[in-house]
Image: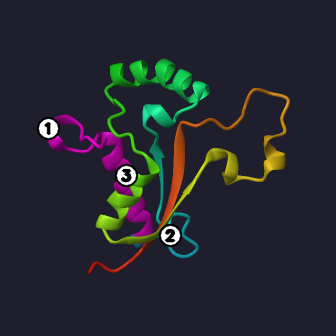
Amino acid sequence: MFRYGNEGQPSQTAMTAAAARAAHLLVDSEPRIFADPLAVYMLTADLRDADGAAYVSLVLPDSERRGEPWLSFFTPEQMTGLLTRHGFTGVRHVRQRDAVSAALWERTDRLRPIELSRLCHATVGTRG
């Protein structure tokens, strides 16, 4: 479920990222790396796999201690609903495993995709 940070406001990290993205789109010339509406969102606990849950149990407490608690967790359906209500269309959700060629996951180290977050791509539509 979506929650805001302190006193109903987005976190400092969210504000900094949004400001940097806005400046990039307004100031930088083509090609713009952030031209497509793309987001990464954290999955609700019931959708995480064992590795995703382990990652959260290790990282979340330290993140909270440092003043950047993870406050927002979504199902793909919740994210689609949120984006649609704000005028986005063509919402697509992409798992880490599906973000790159399957051959790139054939590794000898421990880096592998986990069910922790999803990439979300959408098109800026018109509000009705």
Q: 45 above or below 78?
A: above
Quarter the N terminus occupies: top left
Quarter the C terminus occupies: bottom left
Find residue 61 and report its image quarter: top left
Eye-nearest disc, 1 or 3:
3
Q: Locate residue 100, reporting x and y percent.
A: 72, 52
Residue at 63%, 35% (x, y): give it. 114
Q: 120 above or below 47?
A: below
Residue projecting furthest to the left: 7
Distance from the alpha carbon under mark 2 to that under mark 1 = 31 Å
Q: Which residue is mark 2?
A: 35
- On residue 78, the disc is 3
Residue at 52%, 25% (x, y): give it. 53
- On residue 7, the disc is 1
Q: Amino acid at mark 3?
A: Gln
Image: magenta residue range? 1-25
Q: 32 above or below 8?
A: below
